[in-house]
Amino acid sequence: MSTPSAPLFAITQGDSAGIGPETIAKAFRDAPDALRGCFVVGDVATLRRAAQCTLRPGVPELPVALLDNPQDALHVPPRCLPVWQLPGLPGPQPFGQISAQAGRAAAECVVWAAQAALRGEVAGLITAPLHKEALHAAGVDYPGHTELLQAQAAAHAGVTLAQMPVRMMLANDELRTVLVSIHISLREALAAVTQDNVLQTLLITHTALQRSLGRAPHIAVAGLNPHAGEGGLFGREEIEHIAPAIAAARAQGLHVTGPLAPDTVFMRARHSATKPGEFDVVLAMYHDQGLIPVKYLGVDKGVNVTLGLPLVRTSPDHGTAFDIAGQGVADAGSLIEAVRMARALA
């Protein structure tokens, strides 16, 4: 496949037992302008089943097109779902059930799309949700998208995982947050709050947002402990690790404020139509500290962005939602926003 003449974006189908395929079908049906130049990496039967799930009285049927070449997606008419079929890919699995077959299919789609992006054949990838237990059942040794993409990028560059550090950012129109650690236990996450890890996260965040904002971002750093440790009364991580990392970042010219009380910093950073936030992004110390505030604002608006990779990758901020899969009620808003974000980043 040669380099496309116009931006081309790959959307991975996600876990076929979850809502990913049907949100993709809804996005192509309801937001044709946003989905221009996109195609789905996956299984045609899975996407055809998903298109049928979204049928409602008065809603026209969504045709599914099997592509001979991914670049043909640039010429597919609006409200048509173009699919690049991977050879040997497992077909649709029962809705709402953890399946090794679904996990394998989801992983293979991500690997293909990542390699295409690393070769420059697509401008970016948007990943529909996968199920971590299904990945594990399939023998995939990575807990999620971020780690799987990191491994692909490191292998492509011929470097170790440590030499390809990545971070997760969750963003919407009101708030951005970046995490020091991602999919590890809370006990391990506390141990990961070190000066080196915090500084590395600050540097990755600064580089990524400077590129997308066109200026140096103002980064707020959340403390780990209540009241950001209250001068050591409630914990010394702020004094021994977080503050020294902030000082080192400032010495390199970064615009960083903190450590700040984690129970108020997200409110201070939130942007609204009437009041801009004080900061462009909040650096959070662990997964739930940073993701709960963004998801509380609405999972239909949130977008997951992987920072530090030599490719553009975004994802909706919701999971596979096995409890509603196949019912045609899943909201495609977050996926559509993920496509828009990928286009803006690319």
Image (cartoon, grey):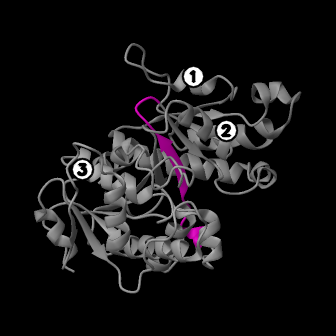
In percent of width and height, residue 287 lies at: 65, 46
- The relative height of residue 216 versus residue 77 in the rendered view (above or below) is above
Q: Mark 3 points at which residue?
A: 29
Count neighbours of disc 2 (C-alpha within 10 A) and say few if under 14, some if 14 to 19, many if 20 or more.
some
Q: How far is mark 2 from mark 1, CA to CA?
A: 13 Å
Q: Counting other residues with Cα less than 10 Å from the Cα at mark 1, is it few (<14), some (14-19), or many (20 or more)?
A: some
> Marks 3 and 1, how far apart in space?
35 Å
Pick whichever, 197 or 297, lies toward us. Answer: 297
**Alpha-carbon distance for marks 3 and 2?**
35 Å
Q: Nearer the viewer, residue 169 or 9?
A: 9
162 in magenta: yes
Query: Disc 3 marks which amino acid?
Result: Arg
Q: Is residue 114 left or right of residue 193?
A: left
Please tell me which residue is depicted at 39% across the width and 60% down the height of the picture.
21
Task: Work out whether 80 lies above or below 336.
Answer: below
Q: Which disc number belongs to residue 267?
A: 1
Looking at numbered disc 2 in the image, what kind of residue is underneath it? Gln
**Residue 127 visible within the image:** no
**At which x and y percent is residue 187?**
82, 52
**Residue 345 appearing in the image:** yes
Image-quadrant location for residue 248: top right
Residue positioned 52% across, 67% down in the render: 94
> Does 73 appear in magenta?
no
Is the Cβ of the residue at disc 3 closer than 8 Å to that at disc 2?
no
The image shows residue 37 at horizontal and vertical percentages of: 20, 59
Which mark, residue 289?
2
The answer to which of 27 and 160 lies nearer the viewer is 27
